[in-house]
Amino acid sequence: MLIEVGKRCALAGLAQGTSGNLSERNRDGVRITASAASLGSLTAAELVFVTMDGQSTGQRSVKPSSEWQFHRDIYQARPDVHGIVHVHSPFATALACLGKPMPPFHYMIAMTGRAEIPCAPYALFGTAALSSNIVAALGNGYACLLANHGLVAAGRTLEHAFDVALEVEHLAQVYLAAKAAGEPVLLTADQMAEALLRFKTYGAHSAGETGSG
Ligand SMILES: [Zn+2]
């Protein structure tokens, strides 16, 4: 599934070159893409198993992504999360460079489990500081922006994480377009609570409009 979702990320324009990384919870550890792997053309040799205490196994020449630590820390903090997508997709990253959360300008933000999408403060990639900023910003939600960096989506499955990343990228594109034209009207706390409840009741996949409504 990592190879398949890597292709989807590249085809959807979420990942360019060797930026971004993916992982899945795997028994007592994490299966993660290798350092400097290109998400669009992953091979089985570029998937690395890392134990929860940070030991990687397999070919010595293949190192896990430098961001393995925040993947591991999210799995430890969130037993419900089984897949993580991290990308530097252009619109979400543009928004992250403003260092602000994405406010409730559209009801689909509720698919991320909260009324707004927080932005984790900047810290150097691959550091414990970045990891703790991400875990704190993610909270109980499924997505957060990373200031001056990109986007993290965490899902019940890797496919769910991909769906969240794709939606957040789309929302960021729409938000920036709306901001360029004027000041977007924000939904109220009550309106977002109603949307959040709908997503909880019907599940993320059916709560979005699927042809009607
Ligand atoms: Zn990154």
Image (spheres, rainbow, N blue to C red):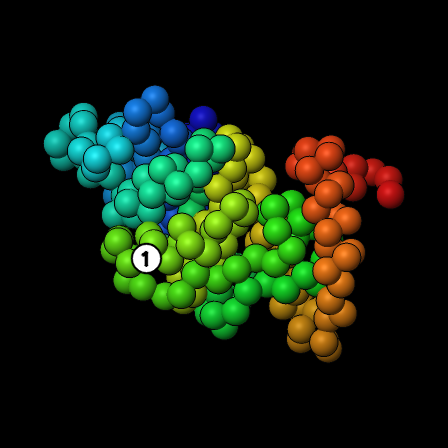
Q: Does 164 appear above or below 157?
A: below
For label 1, the crowd category at 10 Å Cα-Cα, with few meaning under 14, some 14 to 19 and many 20 or more, is: many
Whole-percent x and y of residue 143?
A: 52, 49
Q: Residue at x 68, y 61 (%)?
A: 104
Q: Residue at x 50, y 72 (%)?
A: 98
Whole-percent x and y of residue 191?
A: 78, 56
Which quadrant of the structure image shows residue 34?
A: top left
Identity, as a three-letter code, of the amino acid under mark 1 = Leu
Whole-percent x and y of residue 208?
A: 74, 41
Q: For the residue labelled by badge 1, is the local secondary structure a helix, a strand or a loop?
A: helix
Q: Is residue 126 left or right of residue 196?
A: left
The C terminus, quarter of image = top right
Q: Does 63 appear above or below 95?
A: above
The N terminus, quarter of image = top left
Ligand 1 within 8 Å, label 1 CB: no
Q: Nearer the viewer, residue 17 or 60?
A: 60
Q: Nearer the viewer, residue 115 or 92?
A: 115
**View extreme (right): residue:** 213
Q: Is residue 192 left or right of residue 1?
A: right
Q: Nearer the viewer, residue 175 or 17?
A: 175
Whole-percent x and y of residue 80?
A: 49, 33
User: Looking at the image, can residue 122 be seen?
Assistant: yes
Q: Residue at x 36, y 51 (%)?
A: 19
Residue to which mark 1 is pinned: 130
**View extreme (top): residue:** 27
Q: Residue at x 86, y 40 (%)?
A: 212
Q: Does 53 appear above or below 93?
A: above
Q: Nearer the viewer, residue 105 or 177?
A: 105
User: Looking at the image, can residue 165 be seen?
Assistant: no
